[in-house]
Image (cartoon, coloured by chain):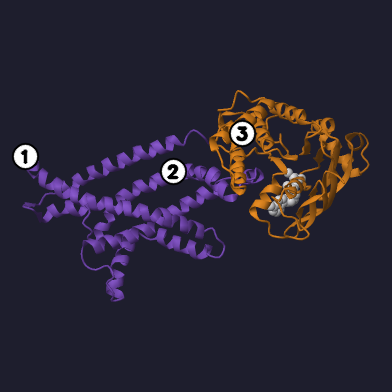
Amino acid sequence: MAFLEVSHIRKSFGNTPVLQGIDFTLEKGQVLSLIGSSGSGKTTLLRSMNYLEIPQEGTVSLNGEILFDYDHPAALRDEELRQKRLHFGMVFQSFNLFPQYNVLDNCTLAMDLLAKDQAKAARQRFDQAAVHKANQEVAKGILDRVGLSTKLANYPCELSGGQCQRVAIARALCMKPDILCFDEPTSALDPELTGEVLKVIKSLKNKDTTMVIVTHEMEFARNVSDKVIFMADGVIEEEGTPEEVFGNPKSPKTKSFLAKSLESI
Amino acid sequence: MELILEQMPIVIHSLNVGFLQTLKLFFITLIGAFPLGLVIAFGSMSPPLKYLTRTFVWVIRGTPLMIQLLIFYYFPGLVLGNPIWGGGESGRLAAASVSFIINYACYFSEIYRGGIQGIPVGQQEAGLVLGMTRGQIFRHVTLLQMIKAIVPPMSNEIITLVKDTSLSRIIALQEIIWAGQAFLKSSQGISGAIWPLFFTAIYYLIFTGLLTILLGKLEKKLSYFH
Ligand SMILES: Nc1ncnc2c1ncn2[C@@H]1O[C@H](COP(=O)(O)OP(=O)(O)O)[C@@H](O)[C@H]1O
Ligand SMILES: [Mg+2]
């Protein structure tokens, strides 16, 4: 049994099929890169994994437990949905930082709210100040890892795109997700800033961090991934190790996509 | 000039009384229109009520407030034979308040709608993937962004409202214009004086000036992010 199992996901928007039966698995500590041309369904697949998008069919399982069973839609209670969603962290193309909070508060806001609700559910005493302080320490440690320990008090509008995206990564890590998902994390960045973000993502790779990365950075995908999936028109056209997919692609669609991506460099 | 100085205390007293009525109408309108505007905003965004609400907003914004005042004040008594407002000044204030609240709520609703719809969905989604509930996202993330977005257009409307209150002169509400105009004919031994009417402008100027400073401070306070 694999750590993450995504099975037969089907999703249409109106009459347009966007995902036409997606299956894949991922082991703990592995990095999966999703590549494919624009419109092939990568974002929709990522969003289907954490219920931001609700597919018509399919299941998402983690550690053998079915998190989302789209075949048997049932209204999830808010609390249930929240717990399930927290297995996944998400880093968006457009950062989506909270503009009115500084870097540190961007990281601690959701941590504090969660801790408060958990204490309430367990009918425990809740010492807001102490919890906030502890959360700040955790967040500071993580912000240090992404190289932002000097920017704690800055607001997002005072940061470069690359710094913003590193805050977004830190903010996601603060919730201790089992799987960290990235949707084209460097596509909104100036070329000279992509490097610092890719370096941070690469530095996260270890035996406990499982990542799914949608990216157009082929060199990066090749270096960092344990597994690569090439999507075309809502299906998995080809999958394998980076050596297999990049070094020896079998499908003509993969070949032509890779040739085009190299051209554009 | 000497005459004016002589008349001054009497006139100022009258204008003060009138301005108090102006202020009453102003604050009652704000207190009523802030929440009603939010209700109308949600109505104009919800699929079943959308068309009805937007038609209503179109009618109210598309006709002069002065006509709305006349209709609200006279229609019940003259046409329906049911003078719900009663005679006196309190009835006129009630009718004026209802007209102003409805009129301003429609303008506010459009500003609110812009504020709500202007917040990128990414903010909501970022909150959701961080395990925040919808209520928490509204309170801790979107609310302040919405307030920041609506402060400048709301300031405009609020300043306009100060001056619009003078329209209630048409139903003889005894606000400051009415009070100033009284000296044009004859009041308290002063007759044929037009300067009190001109003098009312100073009241409006000072009050809108104060509001401008106050609202500017609020805007500045929210300028630390964007
Ligand atoms: N909310 C939506 N409503 C309608 N169509 C959508 C929506 N989101 C995505 N699509 C369509 O689904 C297809 C796949 O989109 P997406 O998953 O964003 O692809 P990718 O991330 O690979 O570029 C596209 O054709 C897109 O136009
Ligand atoms: Mg995409």
Q: Residue furthest bottom?
A: B81
| Res B2 label | 1
Q: Which residue is mark 3?
A: A135
Q: Secondary structure at mark 2?
A: helix
Q: Position of residue A40 (x, y in %)?
A: 79, 47
Q: Residues within 10 Å of mark 2 (few under 14, many from 20)?
A: some
Query: Residue at position x 70%, y 38% from top?
Result: A176
Ligand 2's quadrant:
top right
Regarding residue B105, the answer to whether it shows in the image is yes
- According to the colouring, which chain is orange? A
A147 left or right, relative to B178: right
Q: Residues within 10 Å of mark 3 (few under 14, many from 20)?
A: many
Examine the image and state in which quarter residue B175 appears. Answer: bottom left
Real-space Cα distance between discs 1 and 3? 73 Å
Up the image or down, B86 lies above or below B142; here it is: below
Q: Which residue is mark 2?
A: B151
Q: Residue furthest front?
A: A124
Q: Which mark is nearer the camera, 2 or 1?
A: 2
Tell me which chain the residue with mark 1 is part of: B
Q: Position of residue B126 (x, y in %)?
A: 63, 43
Q: Position of residue B168 (x, y in %)?
A: 27, 57
